[in-house]
Image: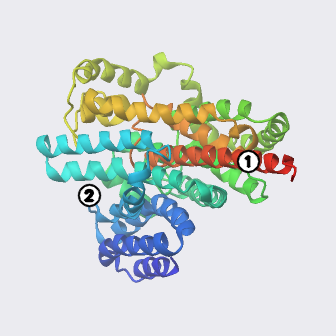
Amino acid sequence: MLSLVLMVGLGILAGAGGGLRLLFPLGATAVGALLYVRYPLLYIGFTWWIWFLTPLVRRLIDQQSGWQDPSIVLLAPPLVTLISVVTLFRHLPIVHRQGGGPFLLCFASVFYGFLIGLVQNPLAGTVVALLNWLPPLLFGFHLFVHWREYPAYRNNIQCTFLWGVLVMGGYGVWQYLTAPEWDRFWLVNAVDTNVFGYPEPLGIRVWSTMNSPQPFAAVMMAGLILLLSNRGNLKFVATGAGYLSFLLTLARSGWLSWVAALMLYLPSLRSHLQVRLLVTLMTMALLVIPLASIEPLASEIAPRLESLSNTQEDGSYQARLDGYNELLGEALTQGIGQGLGTVVESEHLGSNDSSILTFLFSLGWMGTIPYLTGMFLIFFKLFQGAEACVDPFASAARAIAFGIFAQIGLNVAMVGIVGMVLWGFLGMGLAASRYHAQLKIIHSQTINDSLITPV
């Protein structure tokens, strides 16, 4: 890992960005494979960091060596995550007995969409779509089947997201205040500046180390929910930077996800944990509210918050509604679907702006029903267990997954980094359920053995 960091850092300092375009994804995949085999716990944290930071590495390279789109640098996260396909092959014969049937339904739907896409769509677009759909699902499955290592994985993910919120949140605030040259270069070339702000200080909609505000908001939502159960002092520093950058994304779907996750998280805990959480929330509010109330932050955040309660004058909401009216009728007639890689656009909304439209156009009813059935079975299992009452992380994992799923009508929630958050915490939630169930069995057996009197 250190060698990879040094290679990237020295390559950028030496102006060798062109060579890094190929070396970075190859080096990241090699490191990921080594960690998967020899240090499985480090593989988990490394995979998350590759997803967190690769878009920033791409921008640094492009700023030096010229704009390139699509960029092969962005292959690093899916390639590193795809290493966990080994886990699927190893556990496939016994996955149903382990309770992994819902994952199989989702895998079957994705491969169905891939096969349809090979017939109906260009090969490159279909393969790229598969690299968006499959890795999050594989990663969630990998976390689930290693439920015996749940405590170690839990600590690893908590630490990863603590530092992730601190680093990405701090960079996001700095990005807003200074508009670094590589971010301005990317913004001018990649997107409509009316959507992501303007390439100037105090004009950017924060996306930090990600590629856009929505994915960044999804990751920060997860990290901020996890901070509520973290007992370290560093969480207060991370909180200030995290919430400020989260608000500066101006991503209302991310804010709504945070509210949905919090509403589910708080009641699930026992009373003494609820009291501790409320104290933490009040402390965080005392840190964040004064910072968000000063200019120029307040002039950006306040109008966006007000628009949540005034949808009639919200142009984005009205455009999304018009797009649904235009596309939903056609989407509902998709029995077989058009396969992965399908791009269907309207004047107001694209199929890639909504999970519902993406499901129906890409998978049709034939693929959508099994996929959603598998997902609902996992949620049903998570809501049936009692582990959330005694394990704050298990409760947070369930709440985060639900918060991401609540975006299903607003964003594509099951692919890319957003899908990693959804499936990663679904996998951890199932692992927690299985782990705590096994603890109860062991505990019951211990009590029964202690009650047996020798003859």
Q: Position of residue 293 (x, y in %)?
A: 70, 39
Asked if one can make out residue 170 in the rendered structure from this viewpoint, the answer is no
Residue 168 drawn at (x, y percent): 57, 57
Q: Which amino acid type corresponds to the residue marked 1 in the rendered image?
A: Ser
Q: What residue would you read off at disc 2? A: 70
Asked which quadrant contains residue 366, the reply is top left
Q: Of helix, strand and loop, which one carries label 2? A: loop
Residue type marked 2: Pro
Which of the labelled discs sits on residue 229, or is there none?
Answer: 1
Rate crowding at label 2 as few (under 14), some (14 to 19) or many (20 or more) other CA atoms within 10 Å.
few
Label 1: how many residues lie within 10 Å, few (<14), some (14-19) or many (20+)? Answer: some
First in sequence, mark 2 or 1: give its number.
2
Q: Is residue 82 visible?
A: yes
Res. 1 mark: none
Taking depth in this image into account, of 298 and 337 the one nearest to the observer is: 337
Name above or below for residue 74 compared with residue 38: above
Comparing labels 2 and 1, the label whose residue is closer to the camera: 1
The picture places residue 233, in percent across and down from the top left corner, at 79, 58
Residue at image point 40% right, 64% down: 80
Decide: is 24 above or below 256.
below
Q: Secondary structure at mark 1?
A: loop
User: In the displayed structure, does residue 268 sit left or right of residue 261?
Assistant: right
Rendered image quadrant of residue 24: bottom left
Residue situated in front as seen by the camera: 3 or 397: 397
